[in-house]
Amino acid sequence: MKTAIITGASRGIGRATALLLAAHGFDIAFNHLGDGARAADTAAAIEGLGRRVIHAEADMADPMAIRAFASHAQAALGPPDVLVNNAGMNIRGPFETYAEADFDQVMAVHVKGMFVMAQAVYPAMLARGAGRIINVASQLAFKGQEELVAYCMAKAAIIGFTRALAREAAPRGVLVNAVAPGPVTTELTAARGPEWSAAMAAALPVRRMGTPEDIAATILLLAGPGGAFYAGACLSPNGGDVMH
């Protein structure tokens, strides 16, 4: 029996990943923040696929909450085979007036929260000599974007974290990799309006925005047998936005 822990899976990429992994035989534990109704809907969909599921509210900026969620997930479903560090948030703003508190919040969720979450499940993976940790970064870590300095910094830090931990973990059986999505249609991007989405799609070589399911498919690759020879990689399902 396989188990995956996914952060931020009540909607968007996290939800699509949870459903796809469940469809491939994983029991799922996931957290959310202030999104109880959709979390319950995601859980019901996972149960409909015949898998066990637990979910809990846990702020990824709160290390105590993260550790409590990780402990609860492992007690309920057993040690995880896969951790998908997906949860994220964003605060836009020009660099010259960007608030220190906003910077701290972005870093707390993306960087410290990911570090704490991975550290919470890592010992169980080491004990079994097997596990996959998949960290969701962004193509903006490579290209940058105006008014997103903190976000781009955080996503670049995720890639550095992935590579460093991969070197430490792979000889002990734990494979650590990252996924750097390009523009994806989610609630966050939809809020920028149809004109922005149309312009973004037109600028991509594939001429369309990505979907959460596009990203989930790449995560599934890294989580499954096809990911057995990846360590410290950063796969980029981005529609050609960044080619490397």
Image (cartoon, rainbow, N blue to C red):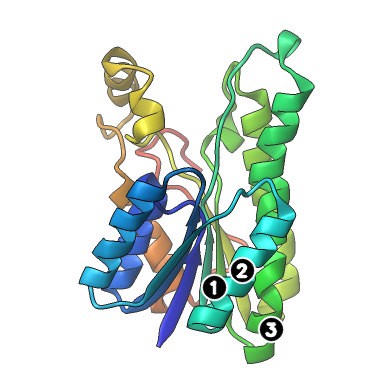
The residue located at (66%, 82%) in the rendering is 124
Name the spot of residue 84 as percent of width and height, x first: 51, 61
Q: Secondary structure at mark 1?
A: helix
- Work out whether 204 lies above or below 134: above
Q: Secondary structure at mark 2?
A: helix
Name the residue carrying label 1: 73
The residue located at (63%, 32%) in the rendering is 152
Name the spot of residue 220 as percent of width and height, x first: 38, 66
Pointer 3 with pointer 2, Cβ within 8 A: no
Q: Earlier in the sequence, mark 1 or mark 3?
A: 1
Name the residue carrying label 3: 126
| Residue 46 or residue 166, whichever sits in front | 46
Name the spot of residue 76 as percent of width and height, x first: 51, 80
In the image, which disc is placed on residue 70?
2
Say which amino acid is labelled 1: Ala
Quadrant of the rendering where the N terminus is positioned: bottom left
Left or right of 39, for residue 123 = right
Say which amino acid is labelled 2: Ala
Left or right of 114, for residue 226 = left
3D distance between C-alphas at marks 3 and 2: 16 Å
- Work out whether 128 lies above or below 85: below
* Nearest-to-viewer mark from 1 and 3: 1
Pointer 1 with pointer 2, Cβ within 8 A: yes
The residue located at (71%, 16%) in the rendering is 98
| Residue 116 or residue 225, whichever sits in front | 116
Q: Secondary structure at mark 3?
A: helix
